[in-house]
Image (spheres, rainbow, N blue to C red):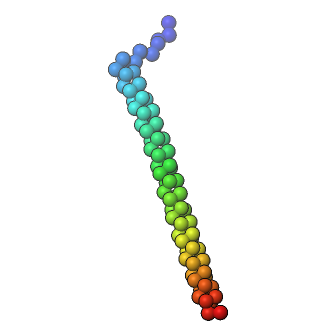
Amino acid sequence: MPKRAPEPEPAYNRRKTANAELRAYSERWLQLADIALSATEKAAKALELAREEQERIRSEIKRTMKRYSENLGEAKKH
C-alpha cells in the first residue's frame, strides 16, 4: 500500500486560514485607501481648477470695469 502524506496539524490549518484572511483584509483596506486617496486627489485638482477659473473671471471683470470707466470718462468729455 502506498504511503499517504501525513495530515497537517489542525493548528497549522488554522494559522494558514488566519493568515489568508488577514492578507485579504489588508488587501481590501489598501484598495479602499487607494480609492479614497484618488478621490481626494481628484477633489483637490477640481478645487485648484475652480480657483484658477475664479481668478480668470475676476481679471475679466476688472478689465471690463476699467474699460467701462475709461469709456464713461471719455463720453463725459464730449
Residue visible at 46% across and 12% down?
A: 4
The C terminus sits in image quarter: bottom right
Name above or below for residue 16 compared with residue 10: below
Mark yes or no: residue 57 visible. yes
Q: Is residue 5 left or right of residue 78?
A: left
Q: Position of residue 44 (x, y in %)?
A: 48, 57
Residue 17 in the image: state x and y as whole percent.
41, 24
How many discs appear? 0
Q: Residue at x 47, y 11 (%)?
A: 3
Between residue 16 and residue 74, name the one nearer to us: 74
**Residue at the farthest top position:** 1
Residue ranking furthest to the left: 11
Foreground residue among 65 and 12 = 65
Q: Name the one closer to the observer, 70 or 3.
A: 70
For image coordinates 40% across by 18% down, the residue present is 8
Q: Position of residue 24 (x, y in %)?
A: 45, 32
Relative horizontal placement of residue 74, taking residue 30 as reference (left or right)? right
Camera sees residue 63: no
